[in-house]
Amino acid sequence: MSLSTTNSSPRIVVGVAGGIAAYKTIELVRRLVSSGYFVSPVLTPDATRFVGAVTFSALASEPARTSLYGDPTTPIPHTHLGQNADLVVVAPATAHLIARYAMGLADDLLTATLLATRAPVLLCPAMHTEMWEQPSVQENLATLRRRGVLVLEPDVGPLAGGDVGSGRLPDAERIFEIIDNIVRAGQSGPLGGTTVVITAGGTREPIDPVRVITNRSSGKQGYALAEVAARLGARVELVTTVSRSLAVDTQRRITVTAVETASEMHAAVMNLAPTADIVIMAAAVSDFTLTPSSGKIKKTEGVPELHLTPTVDILSELLATRRVDQVIVGFAAETDDVVAHAQAKLQRKPVDLLVMNDVSQEGVGFEHSTNSVTLFTRTGEMRHLPLQSKNDIAYEILTSVSSLLGQGAP
Ligand code: CTP
């Protein structure tokens, strides 16, 4: 990792609760920053009795925060920090902080940040042995572990006040290594390092300022593909005609380009495709368009005659201009003689993977949250995926895609 941070540097919130071990966290912040992480310190009011916020501000990537209120950079630090984090670490995590987190309290900036994040959370408890061994503390930690929180067991050794026992905060280097491993694992899924262009939704071809020609595509399958690809480590360029919300944990890896017509989608995809490793044409692109009337067509003028012209077939152009190492995926929505039509489409558009929806089936394709598809590869393999969530279908499609990476075009 580089020594300076960039916009794409992993963002770590370092939470500090009120314990004597807080002095070790200063070293952790320094280590993270020098390894290229963007570090945002959050101190509880009690933490500031042990260590100065100024020290953290001087060493971190931005000034330390100590309060829910009065942040000049954002009116909503309680959600902003957690939503943008790649990981939240709390070191030291005191018995009191652990209890508040387990109860879901949000009475200071650190607990609010813990509630507002979907990033991995690593707790590094540190306290006297008697406190560490209390059933209440252990039960709170068990609750948090069940919810997916990672807990680094404290070391055994000298504690404050001359005591010796379990409850010592591990060294900054050890905590750093654990953070580094967690963040790297999140970045290196099966699609780690790849760029995927995904299209979603149905295009809208204007007839006049009020009316459009469109189709029933909801964009749900395209969005599911984008989110699952991001979770598998890809950087995603989503070209879409519909606006849907993205899960917080995938937002930073997905760039959305909003388009409306087939022609706008064509321009956006052809602009992004040259640097993509994978292109997935999940959108329902209109096959026809027309020159729209500048004013609303009035019915008093009689039934209009619409002169339709063909749109550019984006998928065919992608196939004609592809790099040999690209994987290209097409979709086919069919209603009858589905296998024969899909195989014919594969002849016309020799994609690496064709995803066929039989949209005449209940719960399949347009507008549903579920889907059932048949995958056809260029080499003649065919695999049917029974009815399941669009997310699970996305996972299956992307698993097939990742196995095609590196094989090269014919
Ligand atoms: N597609 C495209 N550009 C178009 C039309 C379709 O890129 N102008 C893509 C779709 O995104 C999909 C695939 O081509 O991935 C197949 O689309 P579909 O409409 O099912 O196939 P067509 O070849 O248009 O055939 P038909 O409509 O006759 O079934």
Image: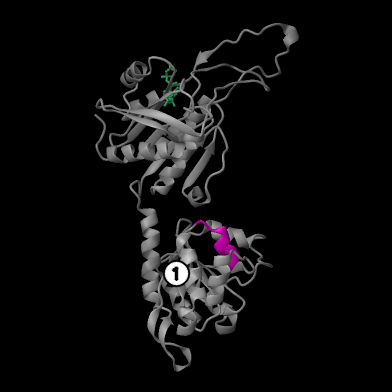
**Residue 182 placement, left or right of 215:** left
The image quadrant of residue 347 is top left
- The residue tagged 1 is 33
Q: Position of residue 360 (x, y in %)?
A: 46, 20
Q: Nearer the viewer, residue 290 or 100?
A: 100
Residue 1 visible to the viewer: no
Q: Nearer the viewer, residue 363 or 378?
A: 363
**Residue 37 placement, left or right of 353:** right
Residue 408 visible to the viewer: yes
Magenta-drawn stretch contains 396: no
Quadrant including the N terminus = bottom left
Q: Which residues are magenta?
A: 111-118
**Total of numbered circles in the picture?**
1
Q: Position of residue 92 (x, y in %)?
A: 49, 76
Residue at 53% x, 76% y: name it. 95
The image quadrant of residue 114 is bottom right
Question: Furthest-right residue in view?
Answer: 300
Question: Furthest-bottom residue in view?
Answer: 162
Assign a secondary structure to mark 1. Answer: helix
Magenta-drawn stretch contains 117: yes
Task: Classify 357 as above or below 301.
Answer: below
Quadrant including the C terminus = top left
Colour scheme employed for the rendering of this structure: one colour
Residue at 31% x, 24% y: name it. 350
Q: Is disc 1 surrounded by few (<14), some (14 to 19) or many (20+) residues within 10 Å?
A: many
Q: Position of residue 30 (x, y in %)?
A: 44, 74
Kind of residue indicated by mark 1: Val
Q: Nearer the viewer, residue 118 or 312?
A: 118
Q: Position of residue 251 (x, y in %)?
A: 51, 49
> Which secondary structure type mostly characterizes the magenta part of the structure?
helix
Question: Furthest-front residue in view?
Answer: 135
Q: Can you tell me which quadrant of the image ligand 1 is in?
A: top left
